[in-house]
Image (spheres, rainbow, N blue to C red):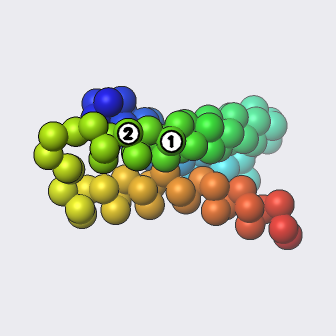
Amino acid sequence: MTIAWVLTAMTTLLCELGALGAWLYSFTATSTVAGLLAGLLFFAAVIIGCIGLAILPLVLKFRKERPPRSITMVFVAIEIVPLLVAVYASLT
């Protein structure tokens, strides 16, 4: 379970960074492919972040030794950022 949780956090982070890069590149590109890629990566970050947040209680319950608190807080922040951005985008 711990490996799956760490992989979801790292994949979410990579999707977030890729979406940010593609979104920034879309301002200079003449085609719409970069904007579509940014949307796809952001959608993946939201879904994978939700999966990571769903796995977290299982990791904390079934693991013999809890992960360090600092790592847990950073991973939760990584996984919750796409959700907050999606909520903010839907409100504006």
Q: In percent of the image, x 22 and y 39: which residue is there?
A: 63
| Amino acid type of the residue that numbered disc 1 sits on in the rendered structure | Ala
**Residue 45 x/y as whole percent:** 58, 41
Q: Decide if residue 7 is on the left or right side of residue 66.
A: right
Question: Looking at the image, which residue sits at the far bottom?
Answer: 92
User: 60 and 75: which one is in front?
Assistant: 60
User: 36 and 48: which one is in front?
Assistant: 48
Identify the secondary structure beneath mark 1: helix
Q: In percent of the image, x 31 and y 44: which residue is there?
A: 61
**Residue 31 x/y as whole percent:** 80, 36
**Which residue is tagged 2?**
58
Vertically, is 84 above or below 82?
A: below
What crowding class fits label 1: few (fewer than 14 Cα within 10 Å), some (14-19), or many (20 or more)? few
Q: In percent of the image, x 14 and y 46: which residue is there?
A: 65
| Amino acid type of the residue that numbered disc 2 sits on in the rendered structure | Leu
User: 69 and 22: which one is in front?
Assistant: 69
**Which residue is tagged 1?**
54
**Residue 80 x/y as whole percent:** 53, 57
Q: How many labels, in total?
A: 2
Vertically, is 67 above or below 31?
A: below
Q: Quadrant of residue 85?
A: bottom right
Disc 1 + disc 2, Cβ < 8 Å: yes
Q: Is residue 53 visible in the rendered structure shown here?
A: yes
Q: CA distance from mark 1 to mark 2?
A: 8 Å
* Number of the front mark, 1 or 2: 2
Q: Is residue 12 visible in the rendered structure shown here?
A: no
Screen quadrant of the N terminus: top left
What crowding class fits label 2: few (fewer than 14 Cα within 10 Å), some (14-19), or many (20 or more)? few
Screen quadrant of the C terminus: bottom right
